[in-house]
Amino acid sequence: MSRDEDLSLLREYTQNESLIKHMFAVEAAMRAYARKLGEPEDKWGTVGLLHDFDYERWPDPPDHPLK
């Protein structure tokens, strides 16, 4: 996925600005860890950015990773 596609998906599913800020913070942390560990920054940045993209729609643990 491209960065534009990542952001489009994030905005489609996430409205809460605090949650969006959290997702950007996790992305930054994941990129830093990837850089430190010699892993692909874009891949791990995307993982961090989108890790909670569907949380507002399915916040309950039994549903969150499955729907």
Image (tube, helix red, strand yellow):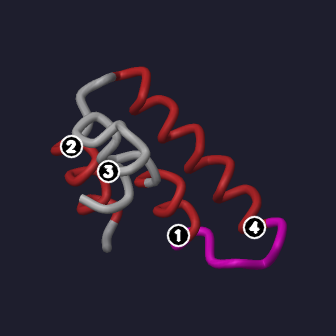
1 sits to left or right of 41:
left
Q: Residue at left 76%, top 60%?
A: 33
Q: Which percent across, then down, holds residue 53?
A: 34, 47
Q: In whole angstroms, how far apart are the C-alphas of marks 1 and 2?
A: 21 Å
Q: Which residue is mark 4?
A: 35
Q: Secondary structure at mark 3?
A: loop
Q: Quadrant of the N terminus?
A: bottom left
Q: Which residue is mark 1?
A: 42
Q: Nearer the viewer, mark 2 or mark 4?
A: 2
Q: Earlier in the sequence, mark 3 or mark 4?
A: 4
Q: Which percent across, then down, holds residue 20?
A: 39, 32
Q: In whole angstroms, how far apart are the C-alphas of marks 2 and 4?
A: 28 Å
Q: Secondary structure at mark 4?
A: helix
| Numbered label attached to residue 13 | 2
Q: Amino acid at mark 3?
A: Asp
Q: Which percent across, then down, holds residue 41?
A: 61, 69
> Quick one: label 2, few (<14), some, or many (20+) residues within 10 Å?
some
Q: Residue at left 42%, top 29%?
A: 19
Q: Residue at left 52%, top 73%?
A: 43
Q: Residue at left 23%, top 53%?
A: 9
Q: Amino acid at mark 4?
A: Arg
Q: Amino acid at mark 2?
A: Tyr
Q: In whole angstroms, how far apart are the C-alphas of marks 3 and 4?
A: 33 Å
Q: Earlier in the sequence, mark 1 or mark 4?
A: 4
Task: Report if residue 42 lies within the magenta region.
Answer: yes
Tell me: residue 54, above or below residue 18: below
Principal secondary structure, stretch drawn in magenta: helix
Evaluate if marks 1 and 4 touch, with contact meaning CB atoms under 8 Å apart.
Answer: no
Q: Which percent across, then down, holds residue 24?
A: 50, 40
